[in-house]
Amino acid sequence: MSLPGRRSLRLERGRDRRGSRRRVASEVKSPAEKLWDEATTIDRTVDRIRADAEAVALATDGATGRSQDVADGLDVDLG
C-alpha cells in the first residue's frame, strides 16, 4: 500500500546505471512517505521476529513439553 499523492523528481548530476556522467532523476519523498516506509519496515521486522519466536517455541515444545509461552510473550505495543 502506498500513500496517495504525486511523486516528485529532482534532477541532479550523477551517473546513470552504465556509469556515464549525466543528469539523473532521483525521487524526492515527503516526510510522510519516509515515515510510512519506516513504519512498514518496523512492522515487517516485528512479524519476522514473531515468526522466529514461534518456530523456536514449537521446536522447544516438543523437546521440553512446554507450551507456546515464548511466542505469546512477544506481543509488542508499538503505539
Image: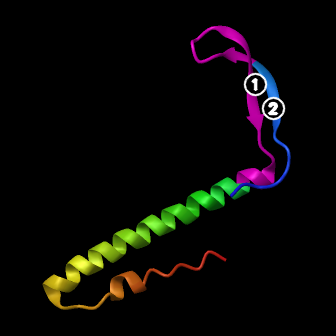
For the point 49% across and 62% down, which residue is it? Answer: 45
Furthest-left residue in this view = 63
Disc 2 vs disc 1: Cβ atoms closer than 8 Å?
yes
> Is 10 on the left or on the right of 14, as rendered?
right
Q: Which residues are magenta?
A: 13-34
Residue tagged 2? 9
For the point 66% across and 54% down, which residue is it? Answer: 37
The image shows a total of numbered marks equal to 2
Q: Which mark is residue 25?
A: 1
Decide: few, some or many residues near mark 1? Use Cα within 10 Å; few <14, some 14-19, many ≥20.
some
Describe the element under mark 2 as helix, strand or loop: strand
For the point 28% across and 74% down, which residue is it? Answer: 56
Furthest-top residue in this view = 20
- Please state, as top left, top right, bottom left or bottom right, where the N terminus lies in the image: bottom right
Colour scheme employed for the rendering of this structure: rainbow
Marks 2 and 1, how far apart at CA: 6 Å
Magenta segment includes 20 = yes
> In this picture, is 46 found above or below 57?
above
Mark 2 or mark 1: name the one nearer the start of the chain: 2
| Residue type beneath disc 2 | Leu
